[in-house]
Amino acid sequence: MGFLNGVGLIWSFALILILVALNGFFVSVEFGAVASRRSRIEVLAEAGNPSARIVKSWLENSEARDRLIAASQLGITLVSLALGAVGENTFETLLEQAFAGLHIPSILQRLAPILAALPLFLSLLIVTSLHVVLGEQVPKVAALHNPERIALLAAQPMRWFNLVFHWFINVLDWATRQILGLLGLRMVGEHLMVYTVDELKQILSESEEGGVIQPPEREMLDAIFDLDELVVRQVMIPRTEIIAVEADTPLPEIIQLATQTTFTKFPIYEDNLDQVLGIVHVKDLLRALQSPDCQSCTARDLAREPIFVPETISVSALLQQFRDNRQHIAIVLDEFGGTAGLVTLEDLLEEIVGEVSDPFDTIIPEIQSLPDGTVLVDGLTLIEVVNQQLGLNLSDPNYDTIAGYMLGKLGRIPQTGDVVESDGLRLRVEQMDGMRIARISLHKIRPD
């Protein structure tokens, strides 16, 4: 190996640094392009940024992305080979010159062959360290921290690199596909880059921890993912809570009812709630009262055709029905075709954004903690909500609400003051609303 003078040494080190930088460039391009967010790139592309248009093509076209990865791998391979040749030769020569002046004691003469190979070993160690740390790890981490910026900076150079090595990249791409075909595999395209709901929730959780989104935003997005698992029975207004009007009710009486309840839509029935004819809107009433042709109209005359849905339909499916039919209210039917309750668009939206309070509402919390440790719970509160907020593990396969849970434990029509002990809790009926449990108190039983 030739002797390196001062000038040659400088050029050799300069070439090594350039090769390490080039290796880092190709590594960062590969990771930056794959990790870039399409939404950010699309904004820049629409603004006329030429580099963003190139990156956008990588993100939208799986073939273009595969070719980019092939080009990056080609660049990494070529640079790595050059770095190995130049770096190993340079450092081995330097180490041999350094070791040449060392005196080896006679006791170590037998180790001379091993010591002769030491410069080669150390030079490989140095080159590998430079390659892995500066040429691989650092660029990779930098690209993952700011992928869009890296991808945009590299777009034009990679475009020219693709043009120069176009034919070779095509050959590599073709060979890769042929080998994968023989193995019964295929290239990973855009259609395979999908995430499960649990994976998306994990991404949201990590985004919240990183400060990208706020806790209320994550909670809303989590609620959206859970809409398919939530059925209308769990969010509807039960039959006993429905305020409806008989079909022959005069319009002024309905207006008076609206002012007393602040509701703007009422189910219209004939004989009983199992025979709902339609929905009357307060705005229709106001128009009718101003019309001379409708002075003797009744609720039946203004009833709009209702939407009927089973109580087992998912909340997400009902949202789609509301959208398709341009309706905000639906009558919920039980398995026998009777009226089980009603549900409004507001009820569904509250499952996403939380309770929406009307300015005229008297706000009573569903779950209220008292200083003595007792918890007051609205009877219509879902068992699932009680478990989440109080850290409990209550369950009943036949009921969805805490009132239903207590009814199942009692096995009879409840009365105010009834007490049940179950699952380490003492539950007491605090308030009845007719035949319905309106409010329950929960108190943890202390073990003796």
Image (tube, rainbow, N blue to C red):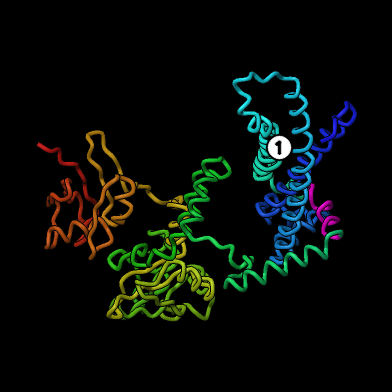
Q: Position of residue 232 (x, y in %)?
A: 38, 67
Q: Is residue 223 magenta?
A: no
Q: Do we see residue 289 in this rendering?
A: no
Which residue is found at the position 55% from the left and 40% from the top? 210
Query: Image quadrant of residue 401?
Result: bottom left
Query: Image quadrant of residue 111?
Result: top right
Magenta: predominant secondary structure element?
Answer: helix
Q: Position of residue 38 (x, y in %)?
A: 68, 56
Crowdedness near tag 1: few (<14), some (14–19) or many (≥20) residues, C-alpha within 10 Å: many
Q: Residue furthest left?
A: 448
Q: Do we see residue 400 in this rendering?
A: yes
Q: Position of residue 274 (x, y in %)?
A: 30, 78
Which residue is found at the position 38% from the left and 80% from the top? 277
> Which one is in front, 225 or 409?
225
> Which one is in front, 296 or 2?
2
Task: Label 1, secondary structure: give it.
Answer: helix
Which residue is found at the position 83% from the left and 51% from the top? 157
Determine which residue is flagged by label 1: 127
Q: Is residue 158 left or right of residue 226?
A: right
In the rendered image, the quadrant that contains the N terminus is top right
In the rendered image, the quadrant that contains the C terminus is top left
Q: Is residue 266 left or right of residue 63?
A: left
> Magenta part of the protein: which range?
153-163
